[in-house]
Image (spheres, helix red, strand yellow):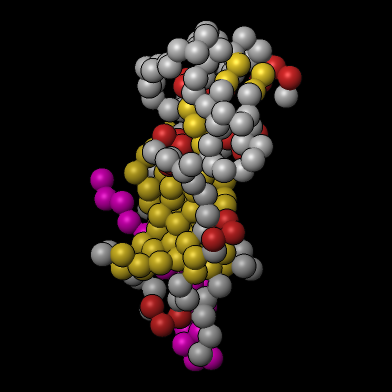
Amino acid sequence: MEFYSIVTNIGFEKINECLNQGTKLDLKFIAVGDSSGSYYEPEIDQLHLVNECWRGEIQEINEDGLGLFARTLMPFNIGGFYIREIGVFDTENNLLIIGKQAETYKPIVSEGTAKDIWLKVVLTSINPDVIELKIDPAIQTATVQYVLNLFNNHSHSDLMPICIYDTNANGIVDSCEYIDGGIFTDNQQMDPPQSPIIPELIMSTLIYDKNKNGIVDEAENINAGEF
């Protein structure tokens, strides 16, 4: 089975208008649908998807080795349907590109699993002279894994793993653990095992670094239960 996209009649009209007037296409949305349960062959005179299930604002229009593309992120909390068709719309909701998409199921949390899906539409069938590159940092989205990697690999001096001071291993620094720059109240130097750092086990030294020298030192005895 072949999967492809085509420029619609109204898409060609808008492209010609831009070429004649020296303007740019204002691409705004990417939409997906389940095509009412079965594949179909996209038609050049289509004005909408057969059965649109979701649409989102285009977050990026850029180019790579395959040429120009537009993409957006369908978040994890959207789903419960199969994706079989995809379309690109302008700000006036004109369907400029319609595509036949390889069937992909988009799960939803209530079904026991969820995932973000990046939707990417190649725009090589449109004259590049009428497309303006667009990357809006205000609506860029980071995946959960990307954020976790930032935490796990973070080495900035204002963060330290709780496991250094969580001597009773209950997941928090509490009133049972007085801290004096890494030397505990029994005056024995501790060398606790270093577990993998995850966001839940990170605290800011700024909470305790009262003299703002970048570390929790002997000048700051801490009874965390009192904070």
Q: Residue furthest right?
A: 226
Q: In front: 159, or 185?
A: 185
Residue 28, image quadrant: bottom right
Q: Is residue 173 above or below residue 97?
A: above
Is residue 6 one of those drawn in magenta?
Answer: yes
Q: Is residue 109 above or below residue 138?
A: above
Residue 65, image quadrant: bottom left
If the image is split into quadrants, where does the C terminus sit?
Answer: top right
Residue at point 43%, 27% (across, down): 197
Q: Is residue 189 above or below residue 23?
A: above
In the image: residue 122, left or right of residue 65:
right
Residue at point 63%, 29% (across, down): 220
In the image: residue 185, left or right of residue 2:
right
Q: Which residues are magenta?
A: 1-21
Residue at point 46%, 37% (across, down): 151
Whole-percent x, y for residue 94 in the image: 57, 66
Main secondary structure along the magenta-highlighted residues: helix
Is residue 12 one of those drawn in magenta?
Answer: yes
Number of numbered callouts drawn: 0
Q: In front: 206, or 6?
A: 206
Q: Is residue 22 above or below residue 44?
A: below
Q: Can residue 7 be seen at all in this image of the molecule?
A: yes
Q: In front: 192, or 142?
A: 192
Whole-percent x, y for residue 122 in the image: 36, 62
If the image is split into quadrants, where does the N terminus sit?
Answer: top left
Whole-percent x, y for residue 121 in the image: 40, 58
Residue at point 62%, 9% (across, down): 176
Q: Can residue 106 be seen at all in this image of the molecule?
A: no
Whole-percent x, y for residue 16 in the image: 47, 84
